[in-house]
Image (spheres, grey):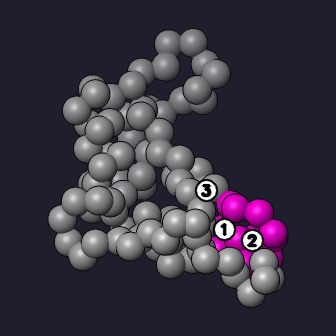
Amino acid sequence: MTECVTIAGWIAQTVKFPVIRDGDTGHGGIMAVRRMVRECVRAGIAGVRIDHQPIEGKRKTQSAGVEVVPIEQAVARYTAPCQGGPRVRIPFPPPASPSHQ
């Protein structure tokens, strides 16, 4: 996860448009989702897409028979960064990186 966030951050600092990162299933449990989102915010990434598939047995979303997690688990993944621990202050709109100014 760290390497993906680092590289996406480099890209976000280089281009003149918002970068959205594929967050997969969040790279683990709720605490991992929180950490991933915080690291993405620090890296200047504008958004993160999080899958609603089980961590184990994940498939391409275009495949037939894709399994999804129960709605409660999906909502917990999506809301995890906003609950518990230090708040992540996400500026809106995101601040421009030096290359955007």
Q: Is residue 14 magenta?
A: yes
Q: Give the residues drawn in magenta, as a range.
A: 5-19
The kind of secondary structure element at disc 2 is helix
Crowdedness near tag 2: few (<14), some (14–19) or many (≥20) residues, C-alpha within 10 Å: some
The majority secondary structure of the magenta stretch comes to helix
Residue at (58% x, 26% y) in the render:
61
Taking the view exactly as shown, the residue that stands out farthest to the front is 93
Q: Find out whether the residues at labels 2 and 1 contact each other: C-beta distance under 8 Å.
A: yes
Q: Which of the pair 71/91 is nearer the observer?
A: 91
Q: x and y percent of residue 101 in the render? A: 78, 83
Q: Which of the pair 24/14 is nearer the observer?
A: 14
Q: Find out whether the residues at labels 1 and 3 contact each other: C-beta distance under 8 Å.
A: yes
**Residue assigned mark 1:** 8
Q: In the displayed structure, would residue 21 be above or below residue 89? A: above
**Residue assigned mark 3:** 21
Residue at (39% x, 25% y) in the render:
68
Q: x and y percent of residue 50 in the render? A: 47, 45
Quick one: label 1 or label 3, which is nearer the N terminus? 1
Q: How far is disc 1 from disc 3 in space, using C-alphas?
A: 7 Å
Left or right relative to 43: residue 53: left
Can residue 47 be spotted in the picture? yes
**Residue assigned mark 2:** 11
Picture quadrant of residue 34: bottom left
